[in-house]
């Protein structure tokens, strides 16, 4: 009787006691904290509701949106070579880097990156141009050889899998084999019409090849950047009709070969055409595709919503963005959080990736002769020839976002975006994403996480970073936390809501931020040079956009001019 009473009392007390902020991870504008785990000096509890602060974060858990299936980057040949060289030079540092990037162990000092995008054949970050079948006319692909890819690519992936067995691997070609192209090379041009029906078999064999190497494939895309023809590295233009034809045939081949679980992804190109190319692709052959992927090099993140509104049941992947050297660290963090790791999720992305995982301090090695990253594409982690390494702003932005959505339980559910708003006179100062992660056992409490960027760094056009004390409203209770200028990820646990979930509306929950009250996050120097061919004018010359923006130097509080040049 006494024991039963204790159990009952514990069950009654648990929902209240557990609504306490347990974990905080923080990156500040001045780099005094860099993805640092903080133990609160005093308990931060949800208690009786009081007066709301000037920034009042209201979590609406009953409004649920998409599941977030992971963050990560691209393991190009160059990234794999860079990491493999580190393994040879300094094995301890190699395993330290992989652990800090990819471990999803509960409580680990790690970003928990869980998604890799891997080129099929050569890209602009390869030692040479090659495909997985360079035998001209081999439409049966009898000479297809997965080992045309460098051995270190597979060994690095397998090493990552030992750290994170839940890793999702998404493969994508930069180009079909050159002998299938109008140019006779993988660089530039398009696929010849006579080879369109054969090409899906090549992609099937790529999926099978990776799987035969012990690497399970989560998704495959038909073509990277199908509106980009660049003669200096592997590219291939495709109309929506051709990509749809290839995708439909590939879907059938995958299904007929025991690979029905492999997701098929379309488009893989910039935001600016979100309402056209991918919409047409889904109208023609949408039944074959799980969804489409976007890149950041042209357009605006809000363009993703044009596609979502047209096809709300299709998944959105955000799969590529790269900064370049010479930009401001904190300004880049602001842009990434605002546009990608809060913004793209608000606009229904369920996957978030940067470009290269690892390169050297100049963004090398690249494909000889390529102009794709004129001033160098900055990787997530820089690895130096002496075996030392450093994490770039891309890492810290990704890590803060990833930590909020990785499973609490090994093999458990991923986080799901839920409703959140910021109210009060300082609502403009915080950008917030909210996520709920369910548990494997129904008796365990769900995790509720916030990713909060305080960009209140400007007053009357002068540098003036100010912390913001905010209230957090959850289930009629309230907690208070002071957010420094930077990015903070925090979470608490609570019993599953008996009210259930209401699926969110078609439009995203987007906070409007008046930039007069905050130093605008200038668009970073994004690294890819593309010859962008629009559907209406395939012979347009490359367009160069030059813009000068003010960027604040976060270490000296001085303002400098940053020039952004992109060919797209």
Image (spheres, rainbow, N blue to C red):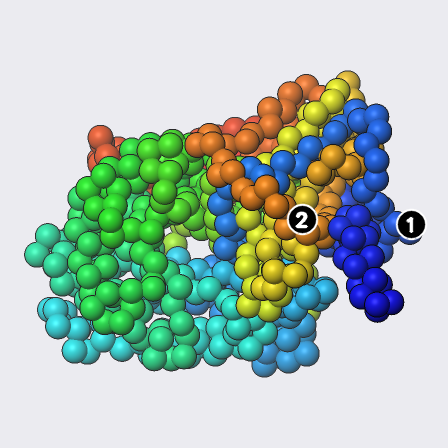
Spot occupied by residue 81 in the image (x, y as percentages of width and height): 49, 71
Q: Residue at x 57, y 52 (%)?
A: 415
Q: Residue at x 74, y 41 (%)?
A: 486
How packed mark 2 is, by other alpha carbons closer than 10 Å (few <14, some 14-19, many 20 or more), is many
Relative to 267, does residue 409 appear above or below in the rendering?
A: below
Residue sitting at x 52%, y 51%: 68
Q: Position of residue 422 (x, y in %)?
A: 68, 29
Residue 430 % position (x, y): 70, 32
Q: Is residue 272 above or below residue 401?
A: above
Above-or-below relation of 261 to 372? below
Question: In front: 340, or 350?
Answer: 350
What residue appears at the point 38 percent right and 67 percent down from the top-left corner? 217
Image quadrant of residue 196?
Answer: bottom left
Q: Which mark is residue 179?
A: none
Mark 1 residue element: loop
In the drawing, does residue 273 fall left or right of residue 156? left
Q: Which residue is mark 2?
A: 448
Q: CA distance from mark 1 to mark 2?
A: 20 Å
Badge 2 element: strand
Residue 462 makes an appearance in the image: no
- The tag on residue 42 is 1
Q: Is residue 396 left or right of residue 555?
A: left
* Front in this rendered view, residue 276 or 363: 276
Q: Earlier in the sequence, mark 1 or mark 2?
A: 1
Dividing the image into 4 quarters, which one contains the N terminus?
Answer: bottom right
Say if residue 516 shows up in the picture: yes
* Farthest front residue in view: 1
Q: Classify the position of the C terminus by image quarter.
A: top left
Figure disc tally: 2
């Amino acid at each position: 009787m006494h024991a039963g009473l204790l159990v009952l009392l514990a069950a009654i007390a648990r929902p209240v006691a557990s609504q306490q902020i347990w974990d905080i991870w923080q990156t500040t504008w001045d780099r005094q904290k860099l993805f640092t785990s903080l133990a609160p000096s005093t308990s931060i509890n949800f208690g009786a509701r009081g007066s709301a602060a000037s920034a009042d974060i209201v979590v609406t858990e009953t409004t649920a949106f998409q599941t977030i299936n992971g963050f990560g980057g691209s393991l190009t040949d160059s990234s794999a070579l860079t990491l493999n060289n580190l393994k040879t030079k300094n094995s301890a540092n190699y395993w330290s880097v992989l652990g800090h990037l990819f471990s999803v162990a509960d409580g680990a000092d790690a970003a928990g990156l869980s998604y890799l995008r891997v080129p099929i054949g050569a890209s602009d970050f390869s030692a040479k141009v090659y495909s997985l079948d360079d035998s001209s006319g081999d439409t049966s692909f009898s000479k297809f050889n997965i080992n045309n890819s460098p051995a270190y690519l597979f060994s690095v992936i397998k090493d990552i899998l030992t750290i994170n067995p839940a890793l999702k691997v998404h493969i994508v070609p930069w180009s079909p084999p050159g002998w299938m192209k109008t140019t006779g090379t993988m660089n530039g041009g398009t696929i010849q019409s006579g080879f369109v029906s054969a090409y899906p078999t090549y992609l099937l064999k790529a999926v099978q090849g990776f799987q035969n190497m012990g690497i399970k494939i989560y998704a495959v895309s038909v073509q990277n950047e199908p509106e980009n023809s660049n003669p200096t590295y592997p590219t291939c233009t495709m109309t929506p009709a051709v990509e749809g034809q290839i995708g439909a045939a590939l879907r059938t081949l995958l299904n007929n070969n025991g690979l029905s679980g492999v997701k098929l992804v379309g488009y893989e190109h910039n935001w600016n055409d979100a309402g056209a190319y991918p919409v047409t692709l889904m109208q023609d052959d949408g039944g074959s595709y799980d969804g489409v992927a976007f890149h950041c090099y042209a357009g605006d993140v809000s363009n993703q919503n044009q596609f979502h509104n047209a096809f709300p049941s299709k998944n959105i992947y955000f799969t590529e963005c790269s900064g370049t050297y010479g930009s401001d660290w904190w300004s880049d963090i602001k842009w990434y959080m605002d546009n990608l790791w809060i913004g793209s999720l608000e606009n229904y992305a369920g996957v978030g990736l940067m470009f290269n995982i690892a390169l050297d301090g100049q963004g090398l090695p690249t494909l000889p002769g390529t102009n794709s990253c004129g001033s160098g594409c900055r990787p997530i982690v820089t690895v130096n020839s002496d075996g030392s390494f450093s994490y770039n702003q891309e890492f810290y932005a990704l890590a803060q976002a990833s930590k909020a959505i990785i499973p609490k339980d090994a093999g458990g559910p991923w986080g799901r975006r839920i409703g959140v708003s910021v109210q009060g006179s300082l609502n403009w100062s915080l950008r917030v994403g909210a996520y709920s992660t369910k548990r494997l056992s129904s008796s365990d409490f769900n995790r509720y996480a916030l990713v909060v960027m305080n960009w209140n760094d400007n007053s009357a056009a002068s540098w003036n970073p100010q912390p913001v004390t905010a209230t957090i409203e959850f289930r009629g209770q309230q907690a208070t936390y002071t957010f420094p200028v930077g990015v903070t990820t925090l979470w608490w646990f609570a019993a599953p809501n008996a009210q259930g979930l209401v699926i969110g509306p078609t439009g995203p929950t987007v906070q409007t931020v008046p930039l007069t009250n905050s130093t605008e996050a200038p668009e970073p120097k994004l690294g890819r040079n593309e010859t962008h061919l629009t559907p209406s004018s395939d012979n347009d010359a490359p367009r160069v956009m030059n813009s000068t923006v003010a960027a604040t130097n976060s270490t000296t509080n001085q303002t400098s001019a940053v020039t952004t040049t992109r060919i797209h």
